[in-house]
Image (cartoon, rainbow, N blue to C red):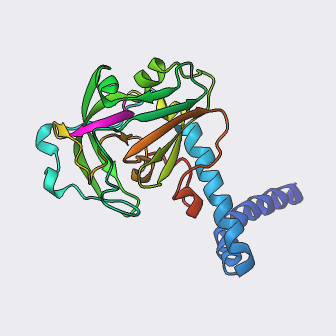
Amino acid sequence: MNSRIDSCQFKTISRRGLLKLTPVAVLGAFAIPQLQKPLLKGGLRFSDWASTRLFRSGHLAPTFTDSDLTPFEKFPINDYDVDDPEVDLDKWTLAVSGSVQKPGDYTLAQIHALPKVTQNTRHVCVEGWDVIGRFGGVRLSDFLKTIGADPTARFISVECADDYYESIDIATAMHPQSLLCYEMYGQPLTREHGAPLRLSIPTTIGYKQAKYLTHLKVSHVLEKVGYWEDQGYPEFYGL
């Protein structure tokens, strides 16, 4: 009987000891230069895997009253290259390709013709700041229905006038708060904020919300994920 108790106590102590030693072992592994990069990549892959499974397509991001809005002049202007890639707004179109029934070039007037949605939501930047803004546009899901996007497709990827590129999974694209955004605070997008069209997706981090859109592709496989993801940032990064 004593031997059984000792054995059980040993197993309990062993489990506790292992749990205590795990972070120490991980930290120790990070101290080895050859293991740092694989561990970081593994951690990002696990984070993306967990995030995609925790994402709920019917769960809405918080919305706010007009009194909660960050003043427009205090909404940060953020980009990766230039504040204004000098898009010719009069000639602009959104090229659509991939697994869709109606590929081609879509004008801003055609996008405006779809039901408009306005929402006060939080924009969160990976740099550590966040603001509450008023965004207007059309649901990305409505646009995807208009172009006859393949319902079995897995990804939406976009390219931009400043050579930025990004992608989102289809569940995020179909979320009711994911917008093709053409106005902020009741006014057309300024050039600095992504005119004439950008993504506004309050369920994701800011770098997923590309500006100056020029091309949208629906696909089953991604050719490239995103500019910052190629620099080692997470691929999903849901909020």
Is 123 rendered above or below residue 22?
above
Is 55 rendered above or below residue 226?
above
Q: Residue furthest front?
A: 91
Q: Position of residue 14 (x, y in %)?
A: 76, 64
Q: Is residue 21 visible?
A: no
Would you say residue 98 sits in the magenta stretch?
A: no
Which one is in front, 91 or 220?
Answer: 91
Q: Is residue 136 visible?
A: yes
Residue at 57% from the left image edge and 40% from the top image edge: 52
The N terminus appears in which quarter of the rendering?
A: bottom right
Magenta residue span:
177-184
Q: Position of residue 97 (x, y in %)?
A: 55, 31
Left or right: where 158 falls relative to 42: left
Q: Position of residue 61 (x, y in %)?
A: 35, 37
Image quadrant in which you'd find residue 54: top right
Residue at 22% from the left image edge and 48% from the top image edge: 190
Left or right: where 106 falls relative to 227: left
Which one is in front, 150 or 40?
Answer: 150
Question: Magenta span: helix, strand or loop, mainly?
Answer: strand
Left or right: where 87 falls relative to 96: left
Q: Position of residue 147 (x, y in %)?
A: 48, 21
